[in-house]
Image: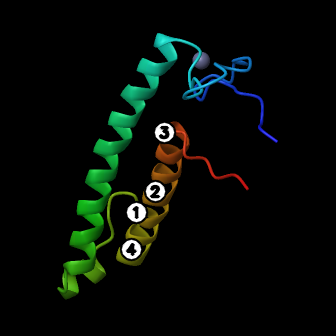
Amino acid sequence: MAKPLTCLRCGTALGDGPPTGRPPRYCGDLCKRLTEYEVRRLDRRLSGYEIELREELADRTAAADAWIDKLGRSRAQRIGDLRRWIKADTERLRALLGGTDDA
Ligand SMILES: [Zn+2]
């Protein structure tokens, strides 16, 4: 059975939607645009995290292991944070784009 349609951004009930074709995902242009901005922000942030993670994993110098960053994190903690943030942002992106597979 289909779940009642709600705006992906604000949760406003959307009624039944059109009888045919693609169901609406947003209650209006504002929610759609806010989502587009957030998707862009997430995409930029994810790109940054991915580069950082790649560099952390590629850096084989002893100094990289010893270095504690300004947040007081070791290299292993930085890598753990980056992996967690990438996962969280990817899940948010997935939800925003309507791909929620909440089984
Ligand atoms: Zn909305």
Secondary structure beneath dot 2 equals helix
Q: Is residue 7 above or below residue 86?
A: above
- Which of the pair 8/44 is nearer the observer? 8
Looking at the rendered structure, the kind of residue marked 2 is Trp
Residue located beneath label 4 in the image: 74
Amino acid type, label 1: Leu
On the picture, is 50 further left or further right than 71? Answer: left
Would residue 50 be found to the left or right of residue 85 on screen?
A: left
Q: Which residue is mark 2?
A: 85
- Cα separation, mark 2 vs mark 4, equals 16 Å
Residue type at the position of mark 4:
Ser
Residue 82, which numbered label? Answer: 1
- Upstream in the sequence, badge 3 or badge 2? 2
Q: How far apart in space, not on screen, are marks 1 and 4 (Cα)?
A: 12 Å
The vertical placement of 57 against 33, above or below, is below
Given the current orientation, which residue lies at the most extreme front position? 20
Residue placed most toward the observer, 1 or 34: 1
Tell me if label 1 and label 3 are in contact, CB under 8 Å: no
Which is nearer the N-term, disc 1 or disc 4? 4
Residue 6 is left or right of residue 54, and the answer is: right
Q: Going 39% across and 27% down the picture, which residue do you hit?
A: 36
Q: Nearer the viewer, mark 3 or mark 4?
A: 3
> Marks 3/4: CA distance?
34 Å
Q: Quadrant of residue 34?
A: top left
User: x%, y% of residue 6?
Assistant: 69, 25
Q: Earlier in the sequence, mark 2 or mark 4?
A: 4
> Are the two marked residues, 2 and 1, in contact with CB atoms closer than 8 angstroms?
yes
Q: Residue at x 33, y 35 (%)?
A: 40
